[in-house]
Image: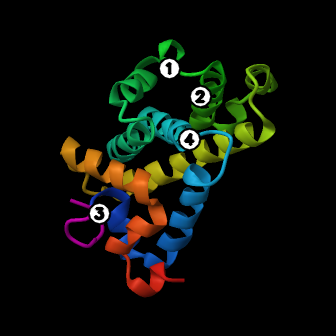
Amino acid sequence: MAYISLPEGLPGIRGLMAFRPETARPMNDFIETLLHGPHTLTPGERELIGTYVSYLNDCYYCQTCHGYIAAACLNGDEELVKRVKADFQHADISEKLKALLVIAGKVQKSGKSVTAEDVAQARAAEASDLEIHDTVLISAAFCMFNRYVDGLGTWQPRDEAMYRERGKRIARDGYVFISQEYLPAETVAK
């Protein structure tokens, strides 16, 4: 049971966004741009970064939801998502993404944990400044979202099929479009 009165039947951040729709739209726009906008990293790679940080933060809702979005973006490869969470250094991902996940893991602990050497290693693996920047921003954003979801004790069902289906829909339709199902029309239409 959530610590505040939230709309029934909306798990995780969805309930929080329905509770305060005036903050939901900018958050959905932000995450849509960050995770699914034009970029040199694929949406699947960016979703993996968010999933990994959420896993480190032990946020069940976010790691599960974004894990299934990542899998949907990566041709349904749910096993890859599990491998990245468990031991990304031995997962079948690029050396660049591994170097970026090192940075993501450091940001999850503290922004000050990221070192010039971490950035140099990412550059050596051919990560651009944009990719390094956005890895830090994705990681920091997910720390905020994880704390938002868990800090208010949101409902986080354990129905994997629900998360899988939602992941496919968000991968296909995006965050802003999918938010129409739980936000007032005037909030989404802006």
Q: Is residue 175 left or right of residue 134?
A: left
User: In this orientation, does residue 135 appear?
Assistant: yes
Q: Earlier in the sequence, mark 4 or mark 2?
A: 4
Task: Label 4, secondary structure: give it.
Answer: helix
Q: Earlier in the sequence, mark 4 or mark 3?
A: 3
Image coordinates for residue 158, horizontal then vertical, percent:
20, 44
Q: Which residue is mark 3?
A: 3
Secondary structure mostly seen in the magenta stretch: loop
Q: Which residue is mark 4?
A: 46
Taking 118 as reference, is 31 above or below it?
Answer: below
Q: Which residue is mark 2?
A: 101
User: Is 110 contained in the magenta span?
Assistant: no
Quadrant of the rendered image containing residue 107: top right
Which of discs 4 and 2 lies nearer the camera? The answer is: 4
Q: Is residue 24 left or right of residue 161?
A: right
Q: Earlier in the sequence, mark 3 or mark 1?
A: 3
Task: Label 2, secondary structure: give it.
Answer: helix
Task: Label 3, secondary structure: give it.
Answer: loop
Quadrant of the rendered image containing residue 31: bottom right
Q: Nearer the viewer, residue 131 or 37?
A: 37
How many numbered discs sit on the rendered protein? Answer: 4
Q: Which residues are magenta?
A: 1-10
Q: Which residue is mark 1?
A: 88
- Amino acid at the residue labelled 4: Arg
